[in-house]
Image (tube, grey):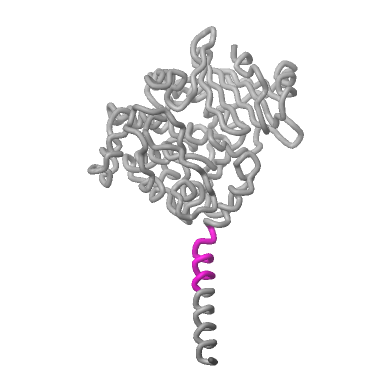
């Protein structure tokens, strides 16, 4: 009897030790997973774990700030933290809640994939036809994979056939949970299987942005964090930003979790609205013409362009990227942009401010 008790005690001790070891090894995942699980509006206020600082440049376009009663009136109709309307020349009409200003850091949440557009604008000038080449051209491991036929354009159009999947952040075996919390974004993408053939079904899915990031890193042969720093942040931004990594010295999230100042989210909108040119007189980031790709509607979902929802305006299409508590609007005809940050539903009639 004593021998049996001893054997059971040893088994229990080994089981507990293995459990503690497994929990410790995956502690970064569980930290983030619980933050996602407990987050209001589905987005954590802060996400623990590995991150990377991107540094802004002293030559960023200057923004000329002005109070505006019209902006204030619109902002008051919702739970608004900041509402900013920036013109082509850098004039900003703004309203801020207490504690916010142009340099306040804000997690872009679902706006983060917009960062990929300036990268593809530049890379498209260096690699003709990039948007319509199968991703397998840049991902050798996908050459024999049916997903290798997906193109970057289809990923931006949300026509990849890769569904969003139900998000259970506490399921460590779920590719969707691994895409949110790590420890390997590339492995999570590789595990994501399609439900539809490419170009046949519209569904906004976070994996599309991370697959686009794999294409960028496959072309430039560098981590995404270094590519964003070199090709975008060091040339456009005025403040430092913080990007989430899947693990220490790992890959940067392209589908979420990028914190930048309100001013720099505005500058990103201005850059796209101006088709890569800067009002500060610096060199253009890409050859003119990529803006026309943004306003080209999907053949399956005509209200969606390249990475943006499309809305008709009196002077032409308006583009908007939206997430919980975040909206970024772009007016290509006037070169203006609009940013709303808050909680809950945005104020009605935001598009009217651009008209």
Please state which of residues 64 and 209 is positioned toward the viewer in this rendering: 209
Residue 242, quarter of the rendered image: top right
The answer to whether residue 267 is visible is yes
Residue that protrudes farthest toward the front in the picture: 1
Q: Which residues are magenta?
A: 18-28
Q: Main secondary structure of the magenta part?
A: helix
Q: Looking at the rendering, in which quadrant would you find the C terminus?
A: top right
Q: At which x and y percent is residue 220?
A: 34, 41
Q: Is residue 73 left or right of residue 226?
A: right
Image point 37% across, 33% down: which residue? Answer: 160
The answer to whether residue 288 is visible is no
Residue that protrudes farthest toward the left in the picture: 144
Magenta-drawn stretch contains 85: no
Residue 145, quarter of the rendered image: top left
38 up-or-down from 256: above or below: below
Q: At which x and y percent is residue 122?
A: 37, 30
């Amino acid at each position: 009897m004593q021998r049996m008790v001893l054997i059971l005690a040893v088994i229990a001790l080994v089981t507990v030790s293995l459990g503690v070891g497994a929990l410790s090894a995956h502690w970064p995942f569980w930290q983030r997973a619980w933050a996602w699980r407990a987050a209001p509006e589905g987005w954590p206020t802060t996400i623990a774990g590995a991150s990377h600082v991107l540094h802004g440049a002293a030559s960023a376009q200057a923004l000329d700030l002005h109070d505006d009663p019209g902006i204030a009136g619109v902002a008051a109709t919702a739970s608004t933290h900041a509402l900013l309307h920036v013109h082509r020349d850098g004039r900003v009409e703004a309203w801020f809640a207490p504690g916010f200003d142009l340099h306040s850091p804000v997690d872009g949440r679902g706006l983060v994939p917009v960062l990929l557009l300036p990268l593809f604008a530049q890379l498209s000038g260096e690699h003709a036809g990039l948007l319509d080449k199968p991703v397998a051209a840049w991902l050798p491991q996908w050459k024999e994979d049916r997903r290798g036929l997906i193109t970057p354009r289809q990923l931006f159009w949300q026509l990849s056939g890769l569904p969003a999947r139900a998000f259970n952040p506490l399921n460590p075996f779920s590719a969707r949970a691994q895409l949110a919390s790590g420890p390997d974004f590339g492995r999570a993408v590789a595990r994501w299987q399609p439900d539809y053939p490419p170009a046949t079904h519209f569904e906004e899915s976070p994996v599309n942005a991370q697959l686009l990031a794999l294409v960028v890193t496959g072309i430039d042969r560098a981590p995404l964090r270094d590519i964003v720093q070199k090709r975008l942040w060091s040339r456009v931004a005025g403040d430092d930003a913080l990007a989430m990594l899947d693990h220490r010295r790992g890959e940067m999230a392209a589908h979420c979790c990028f914190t930048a100042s309100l001013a720099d989210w505005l500058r990103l909108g201005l850059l796209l609205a101006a088709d890569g040119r800067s009002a500060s007189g610096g060199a253009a980031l890409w050859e003119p013409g990529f803006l026309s790709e943004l306003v080209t509607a999907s053949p399956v979902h005509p209200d969606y362009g390249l990475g943006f929802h499309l809305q008709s305006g009196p002077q032409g299409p308006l583009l908007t990227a939206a997430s919980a508590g975040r909206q970024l609007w772009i007016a290509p005809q006037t070169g203006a942009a609009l940013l709303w940050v808050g909680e809950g539903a945005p104020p009605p009639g935001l598009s009217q401010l651009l008209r």
